[in-house]
Image (cartoon, rainbow, N blue to C red):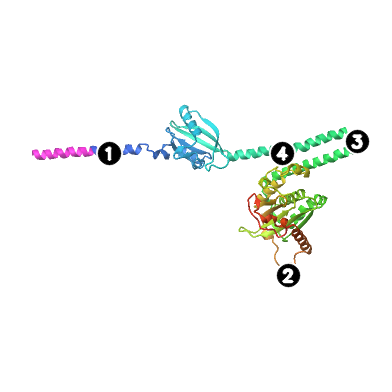
Amino acid sequence: MDVNAAIAAASAVGGVCTGAAAVLAFRWSEREQTRPTRTSLHTDAVLPPGVDTVLSVLRSSAVVLDEGDTVVKASSAAYALGLVRGGRLAVDQMLQMARETRRDGEIRQVELDLPRRSGRGEPLAVSARVAPLGSRLVLLLVEDLTEARRIEAVRRDFVANVSHELKTPVGALSLLSEAVMDAADDPEAVNRFAGRMQVEATRLTSLVQEIIDLSRVQNDDPLEDAEAVAVDDLVAEAIDRCRHPANTKQITMATGGAPDLYVWGHRGQLAAALGNLVENAVNYSPARTRVGIAGRRVAAPGGDLIEISVTDQGMGISQADRERIFERFYRVDPARSRATGGTGLGLSIVKHVAASHGGEVTVWSAEGQGSTFTLRLPEAGSARPSDHRDADEPDDADTPDDADTTADAVDSDAAEHPAQAAGPYATTSTSTHATPHPAPEVLP
């Protein structure tokens, strides 16, 4: 009996110990599960309800820090900007702001310039705002202002340039009007000053019109009223626009290339773009030279393109200037531009027209050899005339005789100026897209 009692007592004690151990193990397991570990600090469990949803829809980069300055939550944009590295906030100024906000609970905001992650290029302009989130968390919102700053700088420069350009002819008109009043008794002086006033008035009108054209090109969608436009009509309109200044300088304008080419777009904008290229070629060419205009079809993966090349025998453009000539109000030679009535907006209009039509404008130039501007636009394929020639009819039967004569004349002149003819394709083309182009079929 004593032995059995001892065994029973031992079993009871063992059961009690086992139960106690099981309870302790269960309690310890629960405590370990609820204890915030280093991994759990980076989960959404420690964030107040709804905060994660709000942060996911914000356009700003978001970072949430705990009391130990450890990143609890960070958006993908924050990583892209380089704000978070290795689970820590990588910007010392923002980290200091977060600590001060955690200490006194005040909202702080500052604008900073941050270096790019690649280490190259202009710094990133950001606006950082720090606010308390609950009792122990801090929320950091960072907005990238780089693009907004760039647009504001462009707008500010544009306003300054417009003001300067308008001030010059307006001031000249004011001075000339005073000169006319003072020379009322001198008819010859009155006529001279009146002629100068007319020149300045024309320049002012041209400047205002080009500003309006540039605004329309930037704001309007040219493909809303698009149509198939014949390249021959655009070339004829551009030549007619520049006929008087070309005749004054005895500049020959030669045309050539493939006939029956059509582009798809807004006729008025395309005519203005090509007219600006031809006008620049005439204005910057010496007297008794040639300006050539040639069109051709070029095969491309997404559909055929039409190239319209305008070549002059002018002074050429340096490498440094070629990178900026499509900027608004930029002039290669400001003094000469003012002498020719240039506003510095023509090539900017050409660039915007080409881009809005799904094309591009490129330039080849060499100092002392001239320049070639090439306008590349998608072809209006449906407008291409069908081939109804008879089988025994020669391939060039539908080409007018005068076009052949013009092409022969242009090719003959190119033979006399081999450097000019080979120029655009002797070196790599420089353009807004740095795209080289093959030689046009006809060059002056």
In the visual, does 54 lie left or right of 359? left
Q: Residues within 10 Å of mark 1 (few under 14, many from 20)?
A: few
Mark 1 vs mark 3: in front: 3
Query: Between marks 1 and 3, how big is the CA–CA gap?
Result: 116 Å
Query: Between marks 1 and 4, how big is the CA–CA gap?
Result: 80 Å
Mark 2 vs mark 1: in front: 2
Query: Between marks 2 and 1, how big is the CA–CA gap?
Result: 100 Å
The overriding secondary structure of the stretch rendered in magenta is helix
Mark 2 vs mark 3: in front: 3
Disc 4 marks a residue whose amino acid type is Val
Q: Which residue is mark 1?
A: 25
In the visual, does 270 lie left or right of 78? right
Which residue is at a point 81% across and 42% down the rendered structure image? 199
Q: Which residue is mark 3?
A: 186
Disc marking residue 162: 4
Q: CB atoms at circles 2 and 4 under 8 Å apart? A: no
Mark 3 vs mark 4: in front: 3
* Residue 4 colored in magenta in the image: yes
In the foreground, 444 or 347 = 444
